[in-house]
Amino acid sequence: MTVRRIMGTEIEYGISVPGQPGANPMVTSSQIVNAYAARPELSKGGRARWDYEEETPLRDARGFTYTGALYDPAENLADEDSGLANVILTNGARLYVDHAHPEYSTPEVTNPREIVLFDKAGEMTMAEAALRAAHTPGIGPINLYKNNTDNKGASYGAHENYLMSRQTPFADIVAHFTPFLVTRQIFCGAGRIGIGQDASEHRFQISQRADFFEVEVGLETTLKRPIINTRDEPHADAERYRRLHVIIGDANLAEYATFLKVGTASIVLSMIESGVFDGTLGIAEPVAELRAVSHDPSLKHKIELRNGKRVTAIELQQSILEQAEAYCGADADPDTREVLDQWAYVLDALARDPMELADMLDWPAKLSLLDRYRERENLGWGAAKLQAIDLQYHDVRPEKGLYHRLVARGKMKRLLTDTEIINAMTEPPSDTRAFFRGRCLARYPSEVVAASWDSVIFDVGADSLVRVPMMEPEKGTKAHVGELFERCEAAKDLLDIITAD
């Protein structure tokens, strides 16, 4: 057993224009993406479009496909034609406009540490994009926030994707992953002032997203949001793989929060694939308990299980961890061992005092800042100043964002260095197909006309386009094709070798 699997994140960023509350968010989001697209390595060739041809977002994991106007690939192409921006980056990531938000999707990676790395590269990408936009004539300042709600009733996503075995029954995922997702917010919540979608009750809660989920299982991502999303779009060989699209989770700034969010999820999914769980941790009312756990930063709330037992979120997570330790065994690889050790450390600290983790996790870090300010200024939770601090925690600008200022003062523990993150803004991961995608865009920018997660399309002349399928995410790696890029001056040379093989 290993924590390693193909995974990635998709983060929609909050956006605002100072002094212009009525600014069109689609226009400003496009300005952000286009500003970053002016980078030299992205502007030296024709911009490759995103290839929607193979996408099937209305196929449901429960065995049917929706019809109608919920999704139409032609609409996405129309969006591009109308000016909504879409850029495929040389690190294999995608930067684009998702309706009213700029969104960064990491390249596919194989381990939790690299999720943190490329997720952080997305933050730096957004910060640079905003800076470039501010210096572009006719645009001016645009502020971006790595958060999940405007506290006025709107929420935007922080999604995760995990490739799984197609052989795993989807009902098993629903039954056994739900209790984990309901309770993991105690270490990966981003914190928020306000209870309810419109934040009408002035209290602090653990998660930014918990109040926006309404059903246990479903296909939607923006209305009637489900704890378990049923989209069946693997972006890989559908006979072998299922991509679990996880839409319940906060956008984390703290590196350890992201690390634990995806690392623990990967371990639990491996346990589900192996049939480890017996159903005794099933929660009676998952949606109600999701909110109740988030609304109680003391972590004392008792969750009612289907078997009648009542446990805290910490106790439920500890039960999962105990089974994970037994499942992984003493010979777990270093990546897996690191997740297990940090998981145990964090749960123990949460049981003692969540504020012990104010240098490691987002919601304790934010709550610590807010409590100090409340005490100093004698403020109630409804104070506008506290709302401003809440938002400023998520500002992507290093000189403005409160999280970034904590990092600069050595107040937050880190897994990475800024040098590593800066490098990841342009360099793809070496051990997935993202390496091939990224290198093609860097090496042959004028000959790549389109790409997606599972293909790259080339125009090599002679009035023909060549699609290179990439249905196996662990092929197209540096070990597999790296040497070809060193000796192939043109895309045609590369294609001649690949098609001959």
Image (spheres, rainbow, N blue to C red):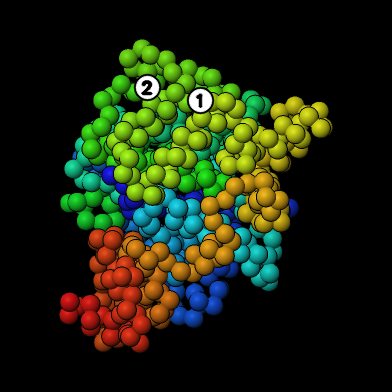
Image coordinates of residue 449 in percent, x first then y, are: 36, 75
Q: Residue furthest right?
A: 377
Residue at the disc numbered 2: 283
Asked which quadrant contains residue 166, the reply is top left
From where the camera sits, is residue 127 visible? yes
Distance (Cα) linking label 2 and label 1? 12 Å
Question: With respect to residue 51, does 486 lie above or below?
Answer: below
Q: Residue furthest front?
A: 330
Q: Quadrant of the C terminus?
A: bottom left
Asked which quadrant contains residue 324, the reply is top left
Image coordinates of residue 474 in percent, x first then y, are: 28, 61
Label at residue 293: 1
* Mark 2 touches mark 1? (CB < 8 Å): no
Image point (37%, 45%), residue name: 336
Asked which quadrant contains residue 322, the reply is top left
Q: Quadrant of the N terminus?
A: top left
Q: Residue furthest top?
A: 308
Which of 46/346 is in front?
346
Sort mark 1 into few (<14), some (14-19) or many (20+) by Cα contacts within 10 Å.
Answer: many
Name the side, left or right, on which 406 lies relative to 98: right
Image point (78%, 29%), residue name: 375
From where the camera sits, is residue 194 visible? no
Name the side, left or right, on which 435 lies relative to 12: left
Which element is circle 1 on? Answer: helix
Q: Amino acid at mark 2?
A: Ile
Q: Amino acid at mark 1?
A: Val
Image point (23%, 77%), residue name: 498
Image coordinates of residue 6 in percent, x first then y, are: 33, 53
Image coordinates of residue 178 in percent, x first then y, are: 36, 31
Question: With respect to residue 388, does 110 lie above or below?
Answer: below
